[in-house]
Image (cartoon, helix red, strand yellow):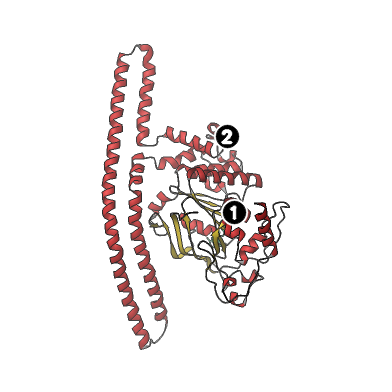
Amino acid sequence: MAEQEKVLEVNNLVVSFKTDNGILRAVRDISFDLKRGETLCIVGESGSGKSVTSKAIMGILANNAIIEGGNIMYRGENLLEVSEDEFYKIRGHKIGMIFQDPLSSLNPIVRIGKQITEAMLINSDKLKLMYNDLISDDLIRYKNTITKMNIAISTEKRNLENYLNEMKAKKGLTAAEKQEIADRKKAYKEFEKKTRAEYGEKAKALKAVLDQTEKDAKQKVKAYKAQVTAEHKAAAAELQKKLAAAPESQKADIKKQIEAEKEEFTNKLKITKAEAKRRALKIMREVGIPEPERRYKQYPFEFSGGMRQRIVIAIALTASPEILICDEPTTALDVTIQAQILELINKIKEERQLSCIFITHDLGVVANMADRVAVMYAGKIVEYGTAEEIFYDPRHPYTWALLSSIPDVDSKEKLEAIPGTPPNMIYPPKGDAFAARSRYAMNIDYREQPPMFKISDTHYAATWLLDPHAPKVEMPKIVSERIRISLENS
Ligand SMILES: Nc1ncnc2c1ncn2[C@@H]1O[C@H](COP(=O)(O)OP(=O)(O)O)[C@@H](O)[C@H]1O
Ligand SMILES: [Mg+2]
């Protein structure tokens, strides 16, 4: 795949939870990005932090969550810092989400049709949408600069504060330590000044561009509205004249034309209820719901699990999102229905050119969906690469274990279960968290966290096996055998 624009960036995200038994470390410093038009699969066993990651992006983490660090960049904003008001506009509007259990995202006592149109009518002002579209690129560029500046400064500030707190805990500082404190404070001040100056210059230029774009956009929207209104007035006047002159037998027909013209006019300025319904029916057809006119009036309980998931997908699509996050969307469905829903998600992703984060515990599903794959274990990304790299050249013992545990295509039997259980994340293990379950673990795995070793420009894995000093280890036979067979068959 060619170098593509990043639509979403997660940098060094750390999320913990307060629990009665202590702090639970759910997501421990993960970074990844999503490129325009791709599907990134996040795969890992239950409890590895997949849902916490998707909820952090959507801004719907539980109340006991603590975001300890990192940022999530989207359209020039750090999603971890946007106001609730702004988040509401982004959530469901630009980023749509589909969960495992469709019932939890549907209102049981509201008809399906209303649930689909509701989402459309929230953002029904077409002039506003037109204006936002016109200024969007320049606005993002400007906001990006400001946000990056704020992130750079706050990261540096946090480092300084951590250091100062450490020093405060000590009793009786040496002269050298006192000097260092003074030096660091000064270095921070200088860093802040320099950063503000650097970014400030750039931001000023971008702001000037944005101001001009906003002015132009206002003009364009105004001109559009004036033109549409003038056309409407002329057409309406024409029809009124026709009505006055018409014989009684034609009057009813002309009155209908007058109504239709009025509706058409309103439609150009905002999404009307009638238009919302038309669009809803169209989307229902798009997601494969038969007899949408009849289904429109039904309640969620009148739908099967697979059909309900289609409705949830329809609702996610009403706002024309550019990113779709699917968190185990087929886990609750039986195998045949699962395949249909996966096919549907692939189809709408292609047709609408969505960028997609697809979360699953099942590498078999990943094979059907992914352009790229992030393998998660115990709150960390342990391997990251293109689908091809993950399936044909896996490097982390955990990825090997996952690959060994995919049910065989022919026999449907799981070849090898992963031994042991994931660690208790209130006491995350030191070093490589998978060591205790891995037959390839070395001493260092129990002591030190492995860094991300680079295998190619797109492929990284965090395992000490990739250290130049590590003994040469072959992946398990069962994995290499499968790779050989699938390469022969392809
Ligand atoms: N609100 C919460 N309070 C405490 N722990 C939580 C909460 N939400 C999730 N966790 C814990 O965070 C870890 C990651 O959970 P999750 O992201 O849901 O895993 P999965 O990869 O299965 O989606 C798990 O150990 C889970 O128990
Ligand atoms: Mg989950």
Vertical arrangement, residue 347 with respect to residue 472, above or below: above
Q: Amino acid at mark 2?
A: Pro
Vertical arrangement, residue 161 with respect to residue 10, above or below: below
Q: Circle 1 is placed at which residue position?
A: 366
Element type where label 2 sits in the image: loop
**Callout 2: few (<14), some (14-19), or many (20+) C-alpha neighbours within 10 Å?**
few
Residue at screen point 51% across, 46% down: 349
CA gap between label 2 and label 1 equals 28 Å
Residue 41 on image: x %, y %: 55, 55
Residue 49 in view (yes/no): no
**Callout 1: few (<14), some (14-19), or many (20+) C-alpha neighbours within 10 Å?**
many
Vertical arrangement, residue 424 with respect to residue 131, above or below: below
Element type where label 1 sits in the image: helix
Which mark, residue 313?
none
Mark 2 or mark 1, which is nearer to you? 1
Q: Quadrant of residue 251?
A: top left
Q: Quadrant of residue 372?
A: bottom right
Residue 167 on image: x %, y %: 40, 81
The outermost residue toward the right is 411
Is the C-beta of the residue carrying label 1 under 8 Å from the nearest atom of ligand 1?
Answer: no
Marks counted in the figure total: 2
Q: Are marks 2 and 1 in contact (CB under 8 Å)?
A: no
Q: Quadrant of residue 479?
A: bottom right
Residue at screen point 56% across, 42% down: 310
Residue 92 on image: x %, y %: 45, 48
Q: Circle 2 is placed at which residue position?
A: 290
On the rendered structure, is 467 left or right of 96?
A: right
